[in-house]
Amino acid sequence: MSDETTQRAADGGASSSGHGAGRSAGGARPAAGGRKFFRRKKVCKFCTEKIDAVSYRDVRLLQQFVAERGKIVPRRLTGVCTTHQRRLTRAIKQARNIALLPFAARY
Ligand SMILES: [Zn+2]
């Protein structure tokens, strides 16, 4: 039975806050509403041009949605709608398989 009660009371007690010394003025934000990125109105290119089926042969079209390295540009950047992005992805992958598009660009 060794009950050593090490009562180390918080020595110092430096945190002596609580003297209502004025409110910290927290609302000093410059009401920045505008974003720095200019964004065009994002409408799906395929919807506007009424391209229903995305053809894998249309390389020039597909290349607009492929980044330099050969990656497919995400939807949030291009503004393509979900349906068309899916078709586009398929088309790009098909095009890659027949070497119309690169899997990854060489450096
Ligand atoms: Zn669309």
Image (spheres, rainbow, N blue to C red):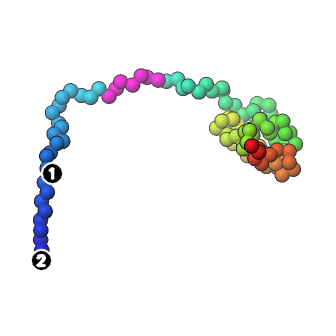
Q: Kindly state the secondary structure of the residue where label 2 is placed.
A: loop
Checking the image for residue 10, the label placed there is 1
Position in image of residue 60 (x %, y %): 84, 36
Mark 1 CB lies closer than 8 A to ligand 1? no
Q: Which residue is under mark 2?
A: 1
Q: Looking at the image, is 55 positioned above or below residue 25? A: below
* Picture residue at 63% right of the left edge, 27% below the top: 39
Position in image of residue 45 (x %, y %): 75, 33
Q: Looking at the image, is 98 positioned above or below residue 50? A: below
Q: Does residue 64 appear in the picture of this structure? A: yes
Q: Looking at the image, is 18 positioned above or below residue 106? A: above
Q: In which quarter of the image is the N terminus?
A: bottom left
Position in image of residue 102 (x %, y %): 80, 46
Q: Is residue 29 magenta?
A: yes
* Picture residue at 39% right of the left edge, 25% below the top: 29
Most extreme residue toward the bottom, as rendered?
Answer: 1
Q: Distance between the residues labelled 1 and 2?
A: 26 Å
**Left or right: 5 with respect to 52?**
left
Q: In which quarter of the image is residue 47?
A: top right
Q: Kindly state the secondary structure of the residue where label 1 is placed.
A: loop
Residue range of the region highlighted in magenta in the rendering: 26-32
Mark 2 CB lies closer than 8 A to ligand 1? no
Q: Looking at the image, is 2 positioned above or below residue 32? A: below
| Nearer to me, 39 or 104 | 104
* Picture residue at 26% right of the left edge, 28% below the top: 24
**Left or right: 10 with respect to 104?**
left
Q: Which is more N-terminal, label 2 or label 1?
A: 2
